[in-house]
Image: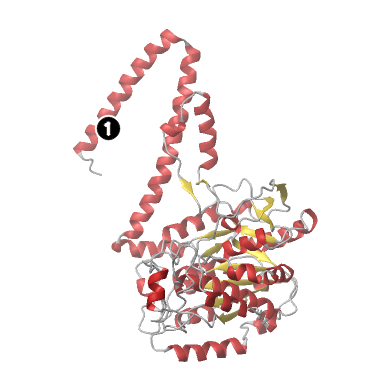
Amino acid sequence: MVVKVTEIVKFEMAIDVVRTFRQKFIAVCRKLGIGVCLRTVILIFCLTFFWVQMHMSDVADNETLQILAKPDGLLDANDSMLQLVPQHLHKYLVALPQHDRPHQAILPGNASEQVATAVSLNASEIRRLIDQQNSKQIVLNEDVFGPLQNDSLVIVIQVHTRIMYLRHTIVSLARARGIENALLIFSHDHYDEQINELIQMIDFCKTMQIFYPYSIQTHPVSFPGESPEDCPRDITKSEAIKRKCTNAMHPDQYGHYREAKFTQTKHHWWWKANRVFNELDVVSNYSGPILFLEDDHYVAEDFIYMLKLMEKSCSVTCPQCSILSLGTYLKTYNFYGEAKKDILRVIRRQQIFAAELTPPSWSFKIVPSFSHYDKAEISQWISSKHNMGMAYNRTIWKQFVDCADTFCKYDDYNWDWSLQSVSNNCLSHEFKVFVLKAPRVFHIGECGVHHKKSCFDMALIAKVQKLLSSVYKYLFPEKLEVTYTPIKKKVLRKGNGGWGDVRDHELCLRMVNRQW
């Protein structure tokens, strides 16, 4: 191995610095005494350890991102990703050898699959196909796994066009213990053959597909999509009235007119819940909780076990709780969180301000440690914290429906903010949530409706997989330790807008067969 001259020079300079520091440190110790020197050594060690841990974490993340970003590193990235997944599940991460597509791992290099389209079908043909699928209510694999039982679990997954994320969501579901007794219902707002093929490959449990019939895809030039007669988003109300564009009299609270790509998500969420609880024959006699996920959620292997444990514990400790939550957006330190906290305490004792040393590295997607693996808390339901991995039963859904006016007319295009309005303004008692301190549902999606560019972060998915592998011994706890968080009345801010069009209100109410 050849060592560069510059590296040797740097190494020798480092040795000289250390030697000089050692000589000066010994001289100071002779003057101040052993006690002061010992405390100084401990402080230096703690600071050094703190810096190294943060540096190594950042370096590891950067190296992973750099490797995955390199075109010539895709082969290694493919191999690395597939090595994290059992061999029999690789089929969910590769493209089918159809439509002239190569048989390869679905990773950042395969951008053609990021947004799959059914270009050969027009809107009327797609409407006919989804009406046909919705009317048949086909349950796949029922002959293998048997009919749905009351002690089973129904999981509803809202799907858009992000097939690469969906592949990894399916892999995580396949690895979960007890999944063979579950029913997966995939709710789509975009009809696509590649996504359909992927779902129809699932052989580890019962599956079903339902299709939102009022999508932008099925109504490309008319409401609920966007028509040429619609008012542009940023036009003023006075100008809209002069143009006589559709719904000129009803902008949102910020003076903007509707955008279909934003309103669709709230409509879809509302429609799928009503469809599942009120219209599907397969769940007509099911009274258990229904878990709602999205196509960019990654579940832990014990998520079904934990949900049942939560349900059992909740019946005793919090019968008034309306919602069970398996995932939260935690504002916590990443992997070395606990070690950093200990070091910060030492630093504070020495009256050194941590903020002047190293800024914290926050993560909203990955739990920092599983020190709370067997803990849950009872809290007031807050949409921004408890909207991921939500589970509730038919009784709670009826409360939602009874407050349909509040949900459907609240000026916010987000379903969770609208549900917060229901909790705060319509119910006699606000929703309470029973939530895990160490989540079993993780958000792996980097892009949503607010992002204009397609993207896929494989490094984040690999990070979640490695985390779950490293904490496997903490999964499947025997019992839950429950704590109570004081209920604080939270004043709901006014909505985010985007929901001022009366046509959206009427469509939303029509989905639950309400009069308006």
Side (left or right) of 312 relative to 27: right
> SS class of the residue under badge 1?
helix
Which residue is disc 1 drawn over? 11
In this rendering, position of residue 124 left or right of residue 388: left
Question: Which image quadrant is residue 51 in?
Answer: top left
Q: Position of residue 19 (x, y in %)?
A: 32, 21
Q: Nearer the viewer, residue 511 or 433?
A: 511
Q: Residue at x 62, y 45 (%)?
A: 371
In the rendering, at what x and y percent does residue 469 appear?
A: 54, 55
Indicate the quadrant containing the N terminus: top left, top right, bottom left or bottom right. Answer: top left
Residue 67, compared with residue 115, is above or below; it is above
Please give the name of the residue rendered at 66% of the width and 65% of the height, measured from the top-left corner.
391
Q: Quadrant of residue 407?
A: bottom right
Q: Position of residue 276 (x, y in %)?
A: 65, 77
Relative to 41, is 239 above or below? below
Residue 415 position, x and y percent, is 57, 66
Residue 77 vs residue 238, the one in the foreground: 238
The C terminus sits in image quarter: bottom right
Amino acid type at image mark 1: Phe
Number of labels in the image equals: 1
Local crowd at mark 1 within 10 Å, few (<14), some, or many (≥20)? few
Let me know if residue 218 appears in the view: yes
